[in-house]
Amino acid sequence: MPLFRPLVGRYFITLLRSNTFDPPYPTKEGIIMRKIFLIAVSLLFTNILFAQKIAGVVKDQQGKGLDKTTVSLLNAKDSSVVKLAVTDEAGKFSVETTGGSFLLSLSHVGFIPQLTKVVEVQGADVNIGELIMEKLESALAGVTVTSQKPMIEVRADKTILNVEGTINAQGQDAFELLRKSPGVIIDKDDNLSLAGKNGVQVYIDGKPSPLSGADLANYLKSMQSSQIEAVELITNPSAKYEAAGNAGIINIKLKKNKSFGTNGSVNAGYSIGTFPKYNGGLSLNHRNKKVNLFGNYNINNGENVSRMVSTSTRFDTLFAQQNRVVFQNNSHGFKAGMDYFAGAKTIVGVTVNGNLASNDIHTAGPMVFTHVPTNTIDRTLVANNRNDIKRDNINANLNYRYAVTGGTELNIDADYGFFNIRGDQFQPNYYLDYPSRDTIHQAIYNMIAPTDIDLYSIKADYEQNYRGGRLGIGGKIGFVNTDNDFQRYNVFPSGKVLDTLKSNKFAYKENINAVYVNYNKGFKGFMMQVGLRVENTHAKGTSEGYKQLQNGYYEEYDSSFNRNYTDFFPSAALTLNKNPMNQWSFSYSRRIDRPAYQDLNPFEFKLNEYTYMKGNTQLQPQYTNSFGITNIYKFRLTTALNYSHVKDIFAQIPDTVEKTKGFLYKQNLATQDIVSLNVSYPFQYKWYSFFATANAFYSYYKANLGGGDRNIEQGVFSFTYFMQNSFKLGKGWTGEISGYYSAPTLWQGVFKSKALGFVDVGLQKQLFENKATLRVGVSDIFRTLKWQGTSNFTGANMMARGNWESRLLKVNFSYRFGNSQVKAARQRKSAIEEENKRANQSGGQIGGPAQ
């Protein structure tokens, strides 16, 4: 073993110096990214090689071994979590470390938490013998709980990014946080995919968002990172979750203070790239034994610029376009609520949250037309447009919770939410002669597009112990009502006149009724979970407007559709945990993705003079069957292998009409098969901690859309890599370096993209007795977060590339005041039980370096 480490280091140094490894970019930025990637990988492998063990056995007062006791290895200097373990059936545990001074913290349901004396590890294994835990019969009044979450927690069913304390997450919006999340890919049209699969369902505080596409992207861009506590990437949801989302669920958890007494915090941030950006917020909380009052407010103001260059050849014309888009955002986010503790078992709560945003989008840039046979410029189109968007969202929740510790649990939620979106777009089109630049023709439009979305739902979840396991049943009734009124006015040459042929009203109503049953039980050496969810969907869409007849007259049309279908969604998981240090999990689930309401509207929307978009009333839901195998070794190295088969996958298809005009619409491809592999590893040694996760996947698309160049049959291998390095520099200083790399892949089945990535750096200082935090960071320091790709489908040969304002200097200051500790025995007991319940349900699958 001592000989192996220098050999590994020598191998990677040789590789760094060689030219045999092709960089993702033929530029100095690509070479820099290659070296950073290889250095990170070398650190990952060389740091695994040396470790000592701390072993012992946990028993109760009668001398019986306590299984499933959570053992936390803490750094003696600052009590930060180094590693977690769970005792086996005999109460034995073993924790690996690289040496130093440590404390051991023990917690078990129904027992008083224990904290050992300092344990010194100096080059040899340490056995600390028996540790006796006392039953929780005497009160724990006055116990103070302080804890730090790991930056990333990896479990068999999901990955949790605890972004609240991360330096480089400050000063960003929710959309940028997702872009930098492990396994998440965002394409040029702001569509989300997870581990190579589209159809991601985004949740906000456990509630599914009805938005998709550009509406969802703009909404997330208006949400400041200071509002967010964590991002959950749930790849294998159980039957308790809604079946929508074939790639899984991304749940964005907003902050909610749980500390006792009166407390709060203020924060302010500034960042600048091309334009300055500002953000700030205030959070207040008051809690006693009977009530918890909480609320926060955040403001986000700034401009972001992006650029895109594209060329497209259709028939005998080459279209070359350059766009500069400035996105102006002024948003206000808020959350307020109350929890009333009616008794030891009952909580009644109400929560209201919202986001009020004003987004102005200004697009400028010419389109040049070139006649391909003669290679001469024919004319130029100047179409500088402005789109002013008001987007207001408010959600209200009334909830009831009844829970007996270790027994019956009932949760009831009633929700109402609405989105009011108002779009006002001014679109001038000036055709200029070349080279004289005289105006040949002009067409000026004004599009008014109000959209109202109302959401109603009520759900109930009930759990109880049953035959040695845990039985859960529940149901949900949900309604979504959407009204969209698209009004296009011709401004030139006769003033502002409504064009009834280009205007449209679209109403969409969706009702989903669901019931589920879920059962999990632990056996000697393994745990099982099986579930079944049944969902009935009733959807109705009505598209109204006018069409012109051959005789010149107009008549109203009504392109309505009505669907009613019921689906079954089974799920199952098996966890082999006889050896807690080497656990295996096997999972299966079936999921669905329903078309978004915009994708069903058959009306033809004119994006510009040469690009159209319309919905498809024949678009069917896409279904996914997923199988997964996960191994968690010594609570640190996590490996997950997944296979998914997608039927009738959605894809945005570019088509050609009238020889030179482009058409965008969504269609069901035949199938998609995806195999993905994820490997994650956390490491900590004294003042340094490291986390790395790599996602590799192979995706195969196949579709018959009419023969010839309309058919799709191709496979792609790709991978993403994310790393985070943290350095405790002493005297309250902490440093952070994070990086991300995404290899070439395939977007929407037809667009071949190039590689992209970033490196962020940050520095943090604790001030005023750790009540204040100052963070300074620079994102994308090498400006490598750029996209590029090509597409050749139905005669439209396209190349596009672009970038956005990704390199930012960010400064953030936050100050906490009031009581920041959670006191009282009941709350401590509840926290311990919740921690153990979570660990037991996931097989103790917790990982990630402490922050």
Image: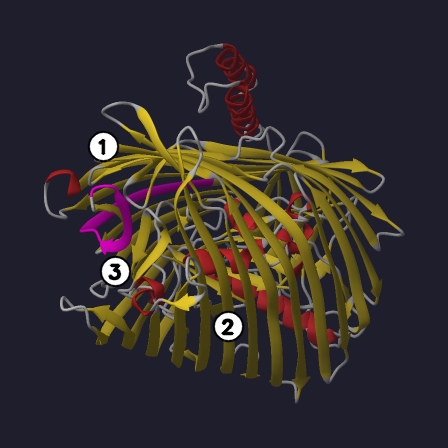
How far from the left and from the top, in percent, is residue 480? Answer: 40, 77
- SS for tag 2? strand
Q: Nearer the viewer, residue 282 or 260?
A: 282
| Residue type indicated by callout 3 | Tyr
The nearer-to-camera label among 2 and 1 is: 1
- SS for tag 3? strand
Identify the residue at image location x=51%, y=68%.
422
- SS for tag 1? loop
Residue count near mark 1 (Cα–Cα under 10 Å), binned few <14, some 14–19, many ≥20 = few
Q: Is residue 313 magenta?
A: no
How far from the left and from the top, in percent, is residue 693? Answer: 49, 39
Q: Nearer the viewer, residue 165 or 197?
A: 197
In the image, taking residue 8 as reference, residue 620 lies left or right, namely left
Residue count near mark 2 (Cα–Cα under 10 Å), binned few <14, some 14–19, many ≥20 = many
Q: In this figure, which residue is indicated by the disc labeled 3?
A: 623
Q: Nearer the viewer, residue 709 or 635?
A: 709
Earlier-in-chain disc, 3 versus 1: 1
| Residue type indicated by callout 1 | Asp
Determine the image quadrant of residue 776: top right
Identify the residue at image location x=51%, y=38%.
307
Q: Nearer the viewer, residue 656 or 120?
A: 656
Identify the residue at image location x=49%, y=44%.
182
Earlier-in-chain disc, 2 versus 1: 1
Q: In this figure, which residue is indicated by the disc labeled 1?
A: 316
Q: In this figure, which residue is indicated by the disc labeled 2?
A: 419
How far from the left and from the top, in percent, is residue 440? Answer: 38, 41
Image height check: is 347 above or below 66? below
Q: Which residue, as the protein is rendered here, is positioned at the far bottom?
A: 342
| Residue type indicated by callout 2 | Phe
Specify the segment rendered in magenta: 659-679
Alpha carbons under labels 2 and 3: distance apart: 28 Å
In the image, taking residue 729 as reference, residue 173 lies left or right, namely left
